[in-house]
Image: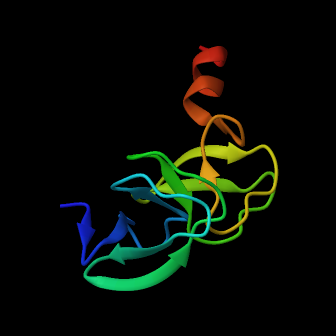
Amino acid sequence: MSKRDGQTRALKGMPQDNVAVILSSARAGDVIQLVCHGKGEALTCVTDIPTFHKIATGNINQGDVVIRRGTPIGIATKTIDKGELVHVHNITSQRAQKSAVL
């Protein structure tokens, strides 16, 4: 279930991750419950985030590696604020870079 007591939840796979996955859509200003290994914390969305998209769990600087489930998934192409949607508009995929080299 994506909501408990009416609150949207997000899952963070590993403590070192800097993104989590929203389990149901959230709007800017919504407070979500971020869960990682049974521990929870509140996080406020600063942008609208669709279901199953990523949210920044902390500030990510331009050029920083974006990590999900302990694995680098891309590089931030601009500063991403805590609580902001993380998607193709603000990261570049490391997979795409590797494919271009091959």
Q: Position of residue 36 (x, y in %)?
A: 34, 75
Q: Is residue 47 left or right of residue 77?
A: left
Query: Disc count in the image?
Result: 0
In the image shown, does 41 or 48 lie closer to the viewer? 48
Q: Position of residue 55 (x, y in %)?
A: 54, 58
Q: Residue at x 73, y 56 (%)?
A: 64
Quadrant placement of the C terminus: top right
Q: Residue at x 58, y 18 (%)?
A: 99
Q: Is residue 68 left or right of residue 47?
A: left
The relative height of residue 81 versus residue 98 in the rendered view (above or below) is: below
**Hey, which quadrant is residue 15 in on the image?**
bottom left
Q: Is residue 23 left or right of residue 64?
A: left
Q: Residue at x 79, y 61 (%)?
A: 61
The relative height of residue 28 versus residue 16 in the rendered view (above or below) is: above
What colour scheme does the image use?
Answer: rainbow
In the image shown, does 81 or 3 lie closer to the viewer? 3
Quadrant placement of the N terminus: bottom left
Q: Position of residue 30 (x, y in %)?
A: 52, 69
Q: Residue at x 43, y 85 (%)?
A: 41
Q: In this view, which residue lies farthest toward the left?
A: 1
Q: In this view, which residue lies farthest toward the front?
A: 6
Q: Position of residue 78 (x, y in %)?
A: 82, 49
